[in-house]
Amino acid sequence: MSDTFLNVDGLNTFYGKSHILHDVGLKVNKGELVALLGLNGAGKTTTLRSILGLTRPRDGEITFDGTSIIGRAPYRIARLGVGYVPEGRRMFAALSVLENLQLAENGRGGEWSIARVLEHLPKLKELVGRRAGRLSGGEQEMLAIGRALVSNPQLLLVDEPSQGLAPMIVEEVYRILAELKARGVAIVLVEQNALLALKIADRAYVMDAGRIVYHGEAATLLADRKLIADLMGLTASELAS
């Protein structure tokens, strides 16, 4: 039996008449963390949205755990075991931390109960009664991860988790992602900060103008800073910043 959990092949996605994704293909194996890298506008978020059914591809194939999910409604894809931590967190600001978690439960069952999530993310446990809109950016990112976990995903799609966060909070978020990977959750991690993502990833894809322009082992790419900079259209100093 193949270890491939997610298989995306020949994906073409449009926004109106604008052709955004061009024959995008990628694979994620069980328990693997795959980094999807590229600058703003490269097509990373559209790739995640296409996988989730939030933006329907014009053509191509997407299979998850051997089941075709192309054209399925997002809630049906979520129920199969695909979780999402969106860019910008997008939670219900007027509801409490606990209420946001309760809304995200989908009845699939599994090890990630609300109690387990709060145990795993102790900062959230201190804030269960606070409205989500009153949380800091880092606290909201923790809630976004917790909200995804209570759906008990087998595959987690994470979009720009470090965006706008202080370095210490970013370190904590990445510690959580590494621990989830160690527990067997497959992860697709979208990041502009290539060096950060490559340190915990197994493999990496780089996107540019809606196309995959590189695929390889994360450790190999991390060791070649010039190649990373060239692929992402950055100078060495921009890459390090």
Image (cartoon, rainbow, N blue to C red):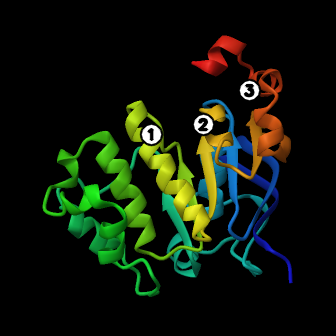
Q: Are marks 1 and 2 in contact (CB under 8 Å)?
A: yes
Q: Amino acid at mark 3?
A: Met
- The reply, left or right, for residue 125 in relation to residue 206 is left
- Mark 2, Cα crowd under 10 Å, few <14 / some 14-19 / many 20+, is some
Q: Amino acid at mark 2?
A: Leu
- The residue identified by callout 2 is 196
Q: Image quadrant for the N terminus?
A: bottom right
Q: Can you say whether 67 is above or below 196 in the image? A: below
* Residue at x-position 33% and y-position 57%: 143
Mark 2–mark 3 distance (CA, rounded to whole Å)? 14 Å
Mark sitting earlier along the chain (2/3)? 2
Q: Can you say whether 203 is above or below 72 in the image? A: above
**Mark nearer the viewer, 2 or 3:** 2
- The residue identified by callout 3 is 232
Q: Can you say whether 73 is above or below 215 in the image? A: below
Image coords of residue 32 (percent x, y) = 70, 62
Residue 16 in sight here: no
* Residue at x-position 35% and y-position 75%: 116
- The residue identified by callout 1 is 170
Mark 1–mark 3 distance (CA, rounded to whole Å)? 22 Å
